[in-house]
Amino acid sequence: MSEFQEFPKIPRWSRRIIVTEKIDGTNGLVWIGGNGEVKAGSRSRWISPEQDNHGFARWVEANREDLKELGPGYHYGEWWGLGINRGYGLKEKRWSLLNTSKWGESRPKCCHVVPTLYDGDMSENAILSALGDLGTNGSAAAPGFKDPEGVVIFHLGGNLYFKKTLKNDEQPKSLVEN
């Protein structure tokens, strides 16, 4: 006999969303263990200074003590800036935490947070307005940079992320010519 599989609950669409700037860098993960261990990861694997991802593991090692302030758990962010994708006109690399609900001014001094562009009830107009503002005014993460990538929409009720880019949003990234 087959094991019963319950149909999942369906989250309501009309719930809170948080729209942030989608930064064109590379995913960076910092894991803090309960006894203070610190590990670096990319989007899909653990990394080390010997097998690094744009210098992120070396940066984590250099900022190990400050990063412990994040507390135990998995902390996801975007590693971006000098030499990574768009570069944003920066002379350095930055790590920006993705969890805007948790991280504001109270965070390790070595960390940034992705800019929140909208926080409220689900609204396609708010999403398009945030995207249009980036297209007109440039990056909120790196003021003065005029070629931002787009937005990330986090739907709290569904615990889901969506992205919308300013250019070529209708195509998979793998098909977009650079």
Image (cartoon, rainbow, N blue to C red):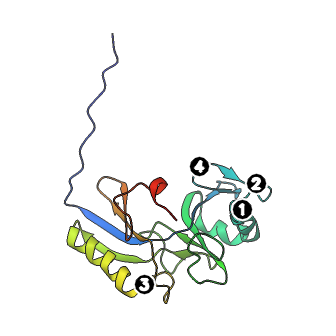
Residue sticking out furthest to the bottom: 144
What crowding class fits label 2: few (fewer than 14 Cα within 10 Å), some (14-19), or many (20 or more)?
few
What crowding class fits label 3: few (fewer than 14 Cα within 10 Å), some (14-19), or many (20 or more)?
some
Q: Earlier in the sequence, mark 3 or mark 1?
A: 1
Q: Earlier in the sequence, mark 1 or mark 4?
A: 4
Q: Amino acid at mark 2?
A: Gln
Q: Amino acid at mark 4?
A: Ser
Are the residues tagged 2 and 1 within 8 Å (C-beta)?
A: yes
Residue sticking out furthest to the top: 1
The residue to which callout 3 is attached is 138
Q: Amino acid at mark 3?
A: Gly
State how far apart marks 1 and 4 are (Cα): 14 Å
Quarter where residue 152 is shown? bottom left
Numbered badge on residue 57: 1
Secondary structure of residue under mark 3: loop
The residue to which callout 2 is attached is 51
Q: Earlier in the sequence, mark 4 or mark 3?
A: 4
Secondary structure of residue under mark 1: helix
Secondary structure of residue under mark 4: loop
Q: Which residue is more in the foreground, 112 or 167? A: 167
The residue to which callout 4 is attached is 44
Residue 27 higher or lower than 81, as above or below: above
What crowding class fits label 1: few (fewer than 14 Cα within 10 Å), some (14-19), or many (20 or more)?
many
- Tell me: 169 left or right of 105: left
Q: Earlier in the sequence, mark 2 or mark 1?
A: 2
